[in-house]
Amino acid sequence: MRKIIFIAVITIIIFITFIKPGKAYAATLSLSPASGTQAVGTTFSVDIILDPGSDSIGGASAIVTYDTAKLQVQGSSITPGTIFGSTTAALTNTVDTSTGTIRYDSGSLGTAYTGGRGTLATITFKAISAGTAQVNFTFNTGTTTGTSIVAAASGPNNLLTSVQNGIYTITSGSTGTSLPATGALEDTLMMLAGGMIFLSAGIFLARKTFVHA
């Protein structure tokens, strides 16, 4: 009997020591789509997706940098999302085209957000030059001075655990119909001219044969 009690006590101690549950800070921010191919001159949208995990959040800050040589943000601000519903307050919404920096700060007024994955904001880019364009979050774990997700009631703690950046391929190809390459046009015109000559000769011979018949 004593042996059974001893084993039970040891089991409880091990459970409390090693399997004690703790709060999971699983909040993430990501760009969607995170990759893709766009032609120069086209516009495309990239969503900033917030996933709070199991946390109750009161606000979020997204600081995003982009390649100004290849991408151009359309407008002086980005489009707010619906992550906080009707209580959303966009505290900061700016685009610095000289440094290629977007800052979007948003929070809930009086009501914490406890929903699931959703769109914090949407960026509309225009592809302006061919190459590979990176779009990155400015993020440092544990600090609220950069990209961060703030808890609703536990003070200025950054709940953000990871971010997913974006990388996009910009091609120089046009979506319009292209003309034949140099040399091909001349060859086509010569073939058409030759065809017209043979057609005219055939008509002339046919009429001559019909007259003599």
Image (cartoon, helix red, strand yellow):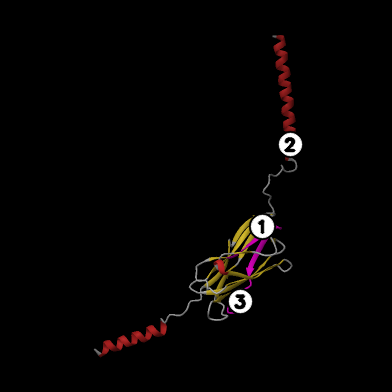
Q: Which residue is mark 1?
A: 170
Single out the mark in the foreground, 3 or 2. Answer: 3
SS category of the residue bearing label 1:
strand
The answer to whether residue 118 is magenta is no
| Residue closer to the observer: 34 or 60 | 60
Cα gap from disc 3 to disc 2, whole angstroms:
61 Å
The answer to whether residue 123 is magenta is yes
Please name the predominant secondary structure of the magenta segment in the image.
Answer: strand
Residue 35 in view:
yes
Residue type, label 1: Ile
- Contact (Cβ within 8 Å) of mark 3 with mark 2: no
43 vs 2, left or right, is: right
Expressed as whole percent of the image width and height from the top left, the position of residue 116 reads 50, 67
Q: Which residue is mark 2?
A: 187
> Residue 43's quadrant in the figure?
bottom right
Q: Looking at the image, which residue is at 52% across and 66% down?
A: 117
Q: Which residue is mark 3?
A: 140
Single out the mark in the foreground, 3 or 1. Answer: 3
Q: Looking at the image, which residue is at 27% across and 89% down?
A: 3
Cα gap from disc 1 to disc 2, whole angstroms:
33 Å
Q: In the image, is residue 57 above or below residue 44?
A: below
- Contact (Cβ within 8 Å) of mark 1 with mark 2: no
Give the class, few, some or many, for how many residues have Cα within 10 Å of label 1's Cα (few <14, many ≥20).
many
The region drawn magenta spans 120-144
Q: Looking at the image, which residue is at 73% across and 21% down?
A: 201
